[in-house]
Image: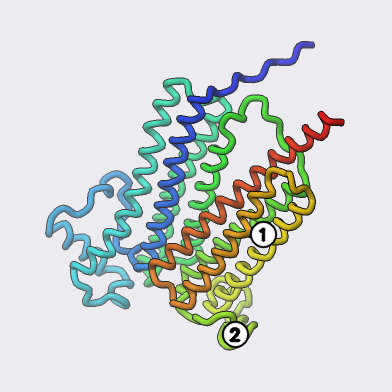
Amino acid sequence: MKRPSAAPAIQAGQARALRIWLGAIAFLIVAMILVGGATRLTDSGLSITEWQPILGVIPPLSDADWQEAFEAYKQIPEYSQINRGMSLEAFKSIYWWEWAHRFLGRFIGLVFFVPFVCFWAAGYIPRTLMPRLIGLFVLGGLQGALGWYMVKSGLVDRVDVSQYRLAAHFGVAVLIFGYTLWLILGLGREAGAKPARSSAATVAAGLVLGLIFVQMLAGALVAGIDGGLGFNTWPLMNGASIPRGLGEASPWYLNLFENPLTVQFNHRMLGYAVVVVTILQAVWLGMRDPRAPYVGSAATLAVLAVLQATLGVWTLLLAVPIELGLAHQAGAILVFAAALYHFWLALHGANRAEGQTAASA
């Protein structure tokens, strides 16, 4: 019985064009995450009190428009309880951060959709890639809706957005970024690529990647409750290695999300865990098979984790100045990208290594 032929491989030029396009989208996603971080650090996220997906791209253009936007801001608790007496010029400074964040979201949608249609019309998009790209576009749209859901939490009864919704919004952004990178790495492997077998190196790389993602969510919770503005000492915290007050909130599980001391303590402990496991992974893989293609990526990941932890301590000691806060956020994204790439190498490198072993037997 004749086996069906595999789908034709994507041509090198087509794959290169798609990588450039998706790479630009990944870059813009990182930019949007960082602008979102700046929006949070400058307390600008509630400056625009309505969601207009289309018309919202146009900022206030006249004095009357600015005054109308300012009057809308004056109706929310953040103004009455925190920023009462704010000048129009000060309002403009926070408005532009939030506008830039939303504008980037719309711009990313445009950068995706227009080239997508062109590539599809030109026959550049393989059949197996099409549903993944459509899924990426849908995720982007859902992320915009999630962003507005987050903002709404701070417009009525709070002076800030919910840390739960902020962490969810940030986490989905990271996942979309990771999914985009995964698509880039997989370009050119659609035809005839066999699914990888599970291996110890692959499982370890996946667990490390998951731990790093959880640590990033913990960092978002710290940002969501301004947990980095207190307990600005290291290595001790509140004068102790395990400070008192970790379980003050009731019921107990609220400490994990709403007690600033506990939230920051967990972020520290997860940071230590990331450093330790990435170093152990690199050493283990180096001793296990020093010629494996993923040993170098494991070592790189360990170095980046150490640098990121060092930057985190520096940021904490200085009570999160905006420059270091954004640098720490960028470092987290870099560590996540390195972990994702290492996982991809472990997944596919294991197959190559098995194939080479079988060929030489």
Residue 346 in the image: x percent, y percent? Answer: 69, 44
> To which quarter of the image does residue 278 belong?
bottom right
Q: Residue at x 66, y 66 (%)?
A: 273
Residue 4: x %, y % from top left: 70, 15
Q: Residue at 58% x, 77% y: name it.
A: 262
Q: Which residue is mark 1?
A: 278
Three-letter residue code for mark 1: Thr
The residue shown at (35%, 49%) is: 104
Residue 149 vertical position relative to residue 243 in the rendered view, above or below: above
Which circle, 1 or 2, is nearer the viewer?
1
- Specify the farthest residue to the front: 291
Q: Describe the element under mark 2 as helix, strand or loop.
A: loop
Q: Is residue 151 above or below residue 190?
A: below
- Left or right position of 353 against 45: right
Residue pushed farthest left?
A: 63
Q: Position of residue 100 (x, y in %)?
A: 31, 54
Residue occupied by mark 2: 245
Q: Residue furthest top?
A: 1
